[in-house]
Amino acid sequence: MHYHILLTELCNSQCRYCYKKSMSEEEFDSNKLKKKFEFDFSAPAKSEVNAKKLRKFLEKDPDPTLVFYGGEPLLEIEKIKEIMTALKDSKCKFRMQTNGLLLNELPSTYTNRISKILISLDGTKERTDFNRGKGTYDKVMKNIQFIHKNGYKGEIIARMTISEHSDICKQVKSLISAGFTSIHWQLDAGFYQSDFNKAEFAYFVDEYNEEISKLVDFWIGDMKINNRVLLLYPFVAIIHSLLRNETSLLRCGAGHSGYAITTDGKVIACPIMNCIKDFEAGDLETEPWQLKKFQIKGRCLKCKDKDLCGGRCLYWNYANLWPEEGDDLICKTIHHLISELKRVLPEVKALIKEGSIKQKDFDYEKYFGPEIIP
Ligand code: SF4
Ligand code: SF4
């Protein structure tokens, strides 16, 4: 199973879509969430999880993966070292989700054991710096070069947040030109209650869908020219299912195959649900297979694309922060994504048949970070 460990609530970045909204009084004071869920804010800001106790818990899982997560996990380098030292010689695998600004500060003996790292980058230097602050792009790219120079051989996934701009094709292409072959993106939609604007979002969705069509064509074109499958996670995962005729549960894994460990050692369905009691699944004394399971409900149960989509996001599905018409627009992007991938499936099959690419090129590790459905 995959466990995100919340090392700190603090962050050293002030991204437009995260900091501004999560600090807004409107979000805090309006009572929609408070009415819906029970909160407990007693957990400390920084992880006080005992590393030996964590090891004991993870040892009961036959295939554990620990994902360092925050806030910004690299603000807690000593804790990362403590945990990785306690888990030395265990079968636990390590992953991390970071903004990359402090990547150069973790000694390479630790970094090189973290075999997949998701790094927040939104595309071009201009876009990344616009969202995340001037100088961010150069600093992060420098840090990526630094870890490579120090022997890092793992996978680096550029994790984009798509908010007010919908030119995703251009942004993904710029990351590919910068050397990334693994890319994931998430739409900043439906996670706060005060940011829905029907006209603006409807316009965004139409443009975004057009861009997704362009990006799918670019992806297939790249397969033909370069005989490779770029790991654009939302595309790869859905094609993987289509090739095998497989259905999928909630693709991020939250509440069925993935959990988060809070700073006080509770186990919850996913990191975003920190402090919400309704999503508690157990604690470090719980046997991993006895952690409470959560299932998608509501609109997804009667959706034609449920078996391929899986339900987008457990938190979004339970919290219902946007009005129905907003969620309809979000789902419009998902239906479009799925239908575009179905459109190119025959081409993918033909490329596999002629040997330009292999079916196993669409294999990917589930639940370590990319949520798959944007
Ligand atoms: S497309 Fe929308 S309604 Fe359908 S399963 Fe996905 S999230 Fe649920
Ligand atoms: S998609 Fe939603 S439920 Fe899944 S990990 Fe992300 S925030 Fe959590």
Image (cartoon, rainbow, N blue to C red):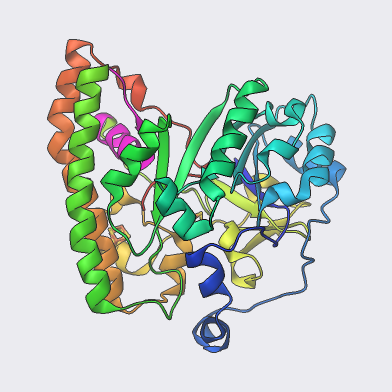
74 with respect to 370 (left or right)? right
- Which residue is at the far top? 355
State the extent of the magenta-drawn residues as a range.
227-243
**Is residue 235 covered in magenta?**
yes
31 with respect to 310 (left or right)? right
114 with respect to 44 (left or right)? left
x and y, in percent, of residue 25 in the image: 56, 85
Q: Is residue 304 visible?
A: no
Q: Quadrant of the N terminus?
A: top right
x and y, in percent, of residue 359 in the image: 30, 21
Relative depth, front residue between 135 and 81: 135
x and y, in percent, of residue 170 in the image: 28, 45
Question: Is residue 147 placed above or below 52 in the rendered structure?
Answer: above
Rendering quarter of residue 111: top right
**Is residue 19 covered in magenta?**
no
- Magenta residues: mostly which secondary structure? helix
Question: Is residue 37 placed above or below 248 in the rendered structure?
Answer: below
Residue at 64% x, 28% y: name it.
147
Relative depth, front residue between 244 and 40: 40
Residue at 62% x, 41% y: name it.
96
203 with respect to 263 (left or right)? left
Relative depth, front residue between 43 and 169: 169
Question: How many numbered circles does the render carry?
Answer: 0
x and y, in percent, of residue 233 in the image: 38, 39
